[in-house]
């Protein structure tokens, strides 16, 4: 949980419903949904201080950051546990 918020709080911040957030999280691969809802969620995350970096794009910010280098599906964490699941 990068922001430390649950689905309900993210929905409030973005002005969308909790089921909208749940559908976005449940979708495998590229997140789907109405463009307006996706835009609202992205803007809420960015207002909270998280920079979303597009594939192949450079960071707009300064300092260190984190970028996922490969899809999470099938990758294993340090303890041998699969990573990338929702929390």
Image: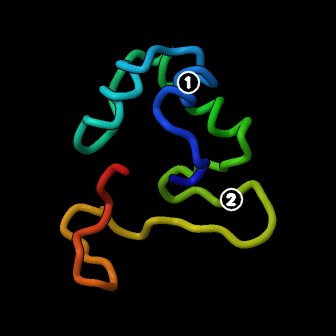
- Picture quadrant of residue 13: top right
Label 2: few (<14), some (14–19) or many (≥20) C-alpha neighbours in 10 Å = some
Query: Mark 2 highlights which residue?
Result: 59
Q: Earlier in the sequence, mark 2 or mark 1?
A: 1
* Vertical position of residue 35 compared to residue 29: above or below: above
* Vertical position of residue 19 compared to residue 60: above or below: above
Label 1: few (<14), some (14–19) or many (≥20) C-alpha neighbours in 10 Å = few
Q: Is residue 16 left or right of residue 44?
A: left
Residue 53 x/y as whole percent: 58, 52
Residue 45 x/y as whole percent: 62, 38
Q: Which mark is residue 50?
A: none
Q: CA distance from mark 2 to mark 1?
A: 19 Å
Q: Are marks 2 and 1 in contact (CB under 8 Å)?
A: no
Circle 2 — which element? loop
Residue 76 x/y as whole percent: 25, 76
Circle 1 — which element? helix
Query: Depth-wise, is mark 2 or mark 1 nearer the camera?
Result: 1
Q: Is residue 87 left or right of residue 50?
A: left
* Vertical position of residue 33 compared to residue 10: above or below: above
Q: Which mark is residue 39?
A: 1
- Picture quadrant of residue 48: top right
Q: How is colour applied across the structure in the image? A: rainbow
Extreme residue toward the right, this view = 62
Q: Is residue 69 left or right of residue 46?
A: left
Depth check: 61 or 84 in front? 84
Depth check: 60 or 75 in front? 75
* Vertical position of residue 73 compared to residue 69: above or below: above
Residue ID at (68%, 39%): 46
Depth check: 77 or 67 in front? 77
Residue ID at (50%, 53%): 1
Residue ID at (55%, 30%): 10
């Amino acid at each position: 949980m990068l922001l430390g918020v649950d689905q309900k709080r993210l929905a409030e911040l973005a002005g969308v419903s909790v089921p909208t957030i749940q559908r976005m999280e449940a979708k495998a691969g590229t997140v789907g949904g109405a463009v307006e809802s996706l835009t609202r969620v992205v803007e809420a995350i960015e207002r909270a201080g998280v920079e979303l970096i597009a594939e192949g794009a450079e960071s707009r910010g300064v300092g260190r950051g984190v970028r996922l280098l490969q899809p999470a599906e099938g990758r294993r964490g340090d303890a041998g546990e699969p990573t990338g699941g929702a929390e």
